[in-house]
Every structure is written in structure tokens, then in C-alpha cells.
Amino acid sequence: MSITEPSPPTEEVRDWEAVQASPEFQDLRHRLRSFVFPVAGLFLSWYALYVLLATYATGFMSIKLFGNVNVALVFGLLQFVSTFAITAWYVHFADRRLDPLAASLRDELEKDPT
Amino acid sequence: MTVLAQGVEGSNPLLNIGIFATFVIITLAIVIRVSRRATAGASDFYTAGAAFSGRQNGIAISGDYLSAASFLGIAGAIAINGYDGFLYSVGFLVAWLVALLLVAELLRNTGKYTMGDVLAFRMRQRPVRAAAATSTLAVSFFYLLAQMAGAGGLIALLLNITNKTGQAVVIAIVGAVMIAYVLIGGMRGTTWVQIIKAVLLIAGAAVMTVWVLGSYGFNFSALLGDAVAKGGEAGQALLNPGKLYGKTGLSQIDFLSLAIALVLGTAGLPHILMRFYTVPTAKEARKSVVWAIWLIGGFYLFTLVLGFGAGAFVGPDAIKKAPGGANSAAPLLAYELGGTLLLGIIAAVAFATILAVVAGLTITASASFAHDIYANVIKRGKLADPDAEVKVARITAVVIGIVAIFGGILANGQNIAFLVALAFAVAASANLPTILYSLFWKRFNTTGALWSIYGGLGITVLLIVFSPVVSGKAIDTVTGRSPSMLQGVDFHLFPLDNPGIVSIPLSFLLGYLGTIWSRERASAGKYAEMEVRSLTGVGAEQASSH
């Protein structure tokens, strides 16, 4: 195998468009995209809300909740919590909904070189 | 200004050097040991044969990502500017979700060594690889220069070496050790240096965090109260956002611009992207990011405590007056807590941090030059001798190391902290749109890729050159100098320090326009192959056993 060639030569003849059009692959693609795009939109909006509040709503963010802990601090820590939670959520989702399907497609493709 | 000529009070330079030398000796021994297992060839040099586990790689990613700027810089920013320093950490962490959800696994399945591999998958090889290498080298160079120049300040601070010649010698030693890591160990050795450094850095920060919280009976609110009290009249403002960025309407927009670049830049940093190739499968790449998110998130929570801890124990005024200014917050806190010994350990960890980060940048830049430019653009992918590529990569690493040393010596003492923000802005403008379009948009083609990379890079660099960080900021009455890099000239045309709010949307737009305006048709077959490979890992996972 030459070091600059991205794919093993035996697979050059495969009809990738047929694989791509297969219902199994379309299912995998749909599952991935219908998770990652909305969740990306969600966390980016949540982050944008935080940044905008920290910039333009400093009065609200400065309200003390208990002791010296104010809204801004809780909001910032919630960004940490949401990041950890989305990470765990995605791993759970990918393990159950993506990996088995991807593995069976991969096995099928690697068994059958055309 | 005479106070700048002294090291941190209580610092014992010999002890600091001793602890740091021990770190260098131990890591070099490990690098030499693991390099014995190495096989010749590009795969081993660039990606350690893709043989690291997700956990190992996740720790190494934290080691690569948590630069001296995030340790000393963020702790210092929180100590002096309070809440606004914390805003950095949030952006730096949330950014990892972009990498987790949209980039890491798909990139692992469609490339081998560099970002150029992914872009070249279905585009015309030579122009796209040349563009990817240009932006990789640019980002690496900005980031590298920032790290090396930071080393100069750290030397003054921790080793009490104040003359420029002495500092230049230490910068040269740091550069030489870094070159040794990369040449001897390749990616395998570099990764182990990053793992060791990450463990030391995170453990050190954890110990100090527990120590600080423990002295307040684990009452964080009481710690905040003390930080406010120590801050004097300006103290109360420390807890609220806006102290640093809230001054004018323009500075608020500048902060928004920075926030966008932070959150979108991480997933486009070439030295981070390359780390995803050091694991065998997409699932391990996912695990890497998960480990990285927990470690980096935990670390930033520690810096929140350390920043306010430094404010409470040392006080913002004492920190500002200390050599190194804000960067001395964490070392001064270490001295307050554990005396000379803890200060020495934290100082050594800070040096180790610079060393590990520059090694990661150097191997990324050299891989991109050797693999994308030399093997595929110059030799058109027809190398007779596969070892020639690694040889070029090694030579490149030495050249980059020497450039970094001289760049670091020249930039020593210059105000170039903006270079890290610039690196993130270029990564978010030139790299991220191109990667996302390439992975998810069927019509995307070579013209679009070239427009988004060169357009993003060009716009970002031009906006920085004509921004107030380079020239034209009003002279600070305290220091008598302008906070801009250049003194006595003013050619700034763009009002913001951070270009992201303009350059990132424009780069996405350019990638789109370049694609739809060119007559070139994207190959449907190649996109089908890329999509199937990226989602299933077919062909990528067994490649490591070849």
C-alpha cells in the first residue's frame, strides 16, 4: 500500500452511490444528522444566550442568589453542566443508535469487496 | 519599573530549575523508551501507528489544549478582572461539543495524517492540499510564537533571569528540548510528553483547588467574599460580568467577536485535529473527546477557584505589581499556600506546559508540510521511497523549531498575547467552514474550498494587521506605552481587536459562493464514498493493522 493513497486499491471498483442509496445507510445518515444538527443548534444558542446576557444584561446577571453567588456564576456553571450532559447524552445515543448500524454496514462492505 | 527586574518573591530559581530539569530528564527517558517500539514509516512518525487508546488520547488532547495561556492566563484574568476571565473558560470548553458532534469521528474515518487528507478526499488534490497546509502552517506559527514569547516572560518570573541574553539562552534550551522530543519520539513520544504534562498540570491544579477551598471550609461563597474584600473599592465588580469588556459598546462587540472565535476555533485547530488520527477507530476518537471534555471542564472549574483564590490570598494589586503581571497569579498563590516548594512545582509544570504544546504544534506543522506539500504537491503523490516523506518531516521539524526559537527571542517582551486569539480566529474562519462543508455538503467543490481557506485566512490576517492590537491604541498613562504592538504609529482601520465576528461569517459565505459560482461539478461518486466511509469507518479501521 502506497503511503499517499487513501484507500486500498481493491475497493476502487465499488459502487459507492449504490451503498449510499441503500436504506440501511440512509437510515444511519438520518439518525446521525437528526441528532447532531439540532443538538449543535441547541448548545450554540444556549451559549449565545449566555454570552449575550453577560454582555448586555449585566444588571440581571449581577443579582445575588445566595451569599456571594450571583446569577452570572450559576449561568456559567450551567454551561459546564450542559456541556457534560450533552456529552453523556451523545455517547449514550451513539452507542445504542449509531454504532450497531455502522458496524453491520461496515462488516457487510468489508466482506464483499465489490 | 524596577520591580519588574525581580523574580517572584519567595521563588528559589535553583529549585525551580531543578524540578523542571527532572521533568525534562524523565520525559526524555520515556520518549527514548517508547521510540524503541516505533517502526519506520510515516504512519508511526505522524500518528504513532494510530495505536493510542481513547483514554490516552483524551489525556494527551488536554495536554495539547491546556496551554500556559489557559493555566496562568485564565487564573490571572479571573484574579484581576473577575468574572470576565471566567468567560474565556466557558467558550474554551463549550467549543469541544463542536468537535464531538460534528468533526472528530467523521474526520478520523476520512483522513490519515492531516487536515489536508480530509479536504483532498473529493477535491482536486494539489490546490486543496496546498491551501490546507498554508492555513495549518499559519495557525501553528501564530500559536507557536505566542507560546515561545510567553516562555520569555515566564523565565523572568520564575527563574529570576532578567537580562535578555539569559532569557534567549533559556528560550533556545526550551526549543532544543522540544526538537529532541519530536525527532526522537515522533507523535508517540510527543503524545507521552503531553500525557505526563496533563496529569501533572491537572493534579497540581486539583491539589491547589482543594487547598484553597479547604481553607474556607469548602464554602465557595466565603472565598468570593474574601476576593471581593481584598479587591478594595473595585472589589464588588469582580463578581459581575462587564469589568473588562463592558466599558463601551465597541468593547462589548469585541467580546462577542472573541466568544464566537473561541467556540468555533477549537474544532479547526490543526494540532487538535491531528490528534484524532492517533486512535484506531471513530469510537476511540469519540472516547478521546469525552475524556478531553471531562478533564478540560474539570480543569477550568479549578482555575475558577484558583483565580478567585489568588484574588483572596494575594490580592489583585499585588498581582498586578508582580513581575509578569496577571500571569503571576497562580505562582504567587502557590507560594502563599505551599511556600517555595509548591511554587517550584507549579513553575516547572508551567514550563512543561509550554514544552508539550510547542512539541504538538511542531509535529503538526511538519506533518502538514511533508505530507501535503512535499509528498502530494511537489512529488504529486509519487514518492519512490516512502521514507523520504518522514525524512522531510524531520527536517521540517528542526527548521520549525529553529524558527520558533528565533521568533520567541525576537518576540520576547513584545505584546503579542493577541496571537492566540488570532490563531483561534484563523482556525474558525479558514478551517472550520471548509471541514464542515466538506463533510456535510454534497455540492461543495475545490473552488469553494480554496475560497473559504484563502479567503478566511486573508481576511482574518488583514483585519488583525489593521486592528488596534497592532497599532493605534491610546497611550496608557501608567506605563507610558500604547497597548498596541507597534508604538508611535497608527494605521488601524478596523475598530475591533477580534476579527471573528466579521471573518467567520464571511468565510462560510465565501465557501458557499465559490461553490455555486464555479462551473466545476462535485463528483457524486466521490461524495458517496466519503459519506459512507465517514459514517461507517469502512476501510479506515483496519488500515492501522497494515
Image (cartoon, coloured by chain):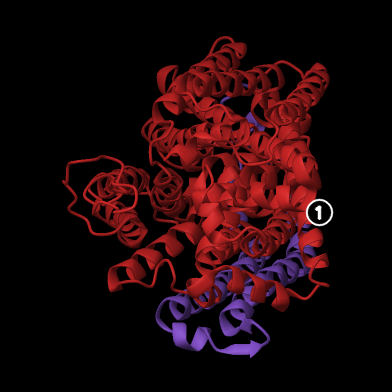
Chain colours: A purple, B red
Whether residue B307 sits left or right of residue B370 in the image: it is right
- The residue closer to the viewer here, B451 or B402, is B402
Residue A82, position as x, y percentages in the image: 66, 74
Asked if residue B294 is positioned above or below residue B9 in the image, the reply reads below
| B511 to the left or right of B88 | left
Q: Nearer the viewer, residue B70 or B542?
A: B70
Q: Position of residue B151 (x, y in %)?
A: 54, 33
Q: Residue at x 48, y 53 (%)?
A: B265
Q: Is residue B54 above or below residue A84?
A: above
Q: Nearer the viewer, residue A101 or B134?
A: B134
Q: Quadrant location of the C terminus of chain B?
A: top right
Q: Residue at x 25, y 51 (%)?
A: B475
Q: Is residue B266 visible?
A: no
- Mark 1 residue crowding within 10 angstroms, few (<14) / some (14–19) / many (20+): few
Residue receiving disc 1: B207
Say which quadrant the N terminus of chain B sits in: top left
The residue at 48%/24% (across/down) is: B163
